[in-house]
Image (cartoon, helix red, strand yellow):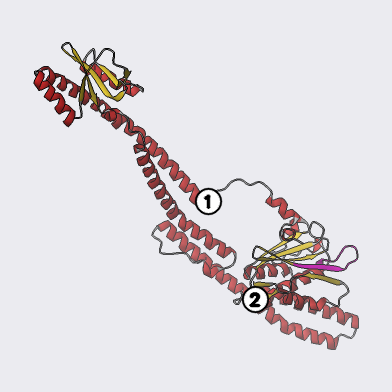
Amino acid sequence: MSPAEVTLPENVALTTTTPRRLKFSLFWRTFVLLALLILCSSLVWLQLFRTQEYEPRIMRNAHQIATVVNLTKTALTHSDAIARVSLLKTLADEEDVNIQTREPNDRIEVFGETAMEKQLAQEMINRLGEGTAVASSVNEKSGLWVGFTIERDSYWLQMDPERLKPLGGTTWLVWFSMAIALSLTGAAIMAGLMNRPLKRLSYAASQVREGHFNTSTLDEHAATSEIREVNIGFNRMAERLAKIEAERALMLAGISHDLRTPLARLRLETELSVADPETRELMAGDIAQLDEIIDKFLDYARPEPTNLGPVLLSGVVSRCISPWRNNPRFEISVDVAEDLHVKAETVELGRVLSNLLENARRYGQSPSDGVTRVEIVARVHDGWVLLRVRDQGPGVSEETLKNLTQPFYRGDTARTSATGSGLGLAIVERSVQRMGGTFSVFNNSSGGLMALMKFRQVEAG
């Protein structure tokens, strides 16, 4: 039998194949919402910068360029030929302004690819007057070229075009990326800080759900008043539940213990006082059944084991099935490796298997001949030992199956008329969970009830 056969009964496989809606943790939902808020805010900020800062800055630069051109025209107009040459050289060396003669056959590319550039060019033409030309390239030499006329001579004034270009290339992208990265980092930190108390509360609630009341204490001195109040309320609830659980266990153990004395007297009086053998046997049977129910109460109220270690599974199975070896109405087949060890507690694991075998004896008779047939199979899968105990009885209804591990619930009506306390499977589930394992009950597709347990595999020391 493969591990898949052990871990995936028919009804479980159908459940796992059902499509589920994609779900996110609260951290990711908070982070995504904060990230979207930051991104939208950044885009709005960028548009605000464009309308309130970028466009006015470009217009101011256009006015400054027009002023430089006018000053250059005035300086050239009022200087003689020798001074003009010196002035042109000074402008080229110190102001990065190059002036060249404008020829009719110059190859020109008009400045203004975008609507904003066309607006800037028109603004400079309005400032400098008719006959002004603005080009982005002259004779295949790029730059910001402004053409103007002094008397009968025409000139080109070449300047650096970067001051009129929008913030582009990698500069704005680098700054924008840095802003987004810092913002998202801050969003992740904020989301983590906001969700950390809730995550701790979720973990503590899961511990309480599993019955670990003493390991679920939350910080009662949190800085946030709302979180502090929730933590204090949760701790008080966990303390009260722990007290109720301890009192319940003590009460069950006390009642069960106190009942043994009158039962022992009843058994003795039955043996001595009842003359009819048949009546005496029936009364002894009733007393024995009451004694078994008391044992169930004691098992259910038993505290958690403290010493978990390597346990030889085959040895525990062998000891548990030994009382049934000579019973012709009880057939047990075992498929467990001889050297397989699990992380458990020997007595507790034996109690688990004994309860499952007793449950099979009571309710798992074959409908054809009334013989109880049980299979015990163990397989190793991904560091876990999958232990299966299956009978060949009639099984139970799906509605009953959901409640089989509830304390004091009995599904006799769907199986046989045998009686019990309704604690057997509840004790099994409780014990397996105390040993760090999992327990599930299924209706086997080929008939019968199947109990599936998972324990951690360990190497023998």
Expressed as whole percent of the image width and height from the top left, the position of residue 149 reads 19, 14
Residues at discs 2 and 1 in contact (Cβ within 8 Å): no
Q: Amino acid at mark 1?
A: Ser
Q: Quadrant of residue 451?
A: bottom right
Instruction: Inspect this view and state whether residue 107 appears.
Output: yes
Expressed as whole percent of the image width and height from the top left, the position of residue 98 reads 21, 25
Q: Nearer the viewer, residue 294 or 154?
A: 154
Expressed as whole percent of the image width and height from the top left, the position of residue 146 reads 24, 20
Residue that badge 1 annotates: 25
Q: Is residue 99 above or below residue 203?
A: above
How many angstroms separate mark 2 from mark 1 (CA)? 40 Å
**Which-is-in-front pick, marks 2 and 1?**
2
Q: Is residue 5 above or below residue 246?
A: above
Q: Which disc, if any, is residue 460? A: 2
Sequence order check: which comes first, mark 2 or mark 1? 1
> Is residue 29 found inside the magenta-colored segment of the image?
no
Q: Amino acid at mark 2?
A: Ala
Q: Quadrant of residue 151?
A: top left
Expressed as whole percent of the image width and height from the top left, the position of residue 205 reads 54, 61
Q: Nearer the viewer, residue 241 or 138?
A: 138
Q: Tag 2's secondary structure? A: loop
Label 2 crowd (10 A; few <14 / some 14-19 / many >=20): few
Q: Tag 1's secondary structure? A: loop
Residue interval drawn in magenta = 363-377
Instruction: Inspect this view and state whether residue 302 appears.
Output: no
Label 1 crowd (10 A; few <14 / some 14-19 / many >=20): few
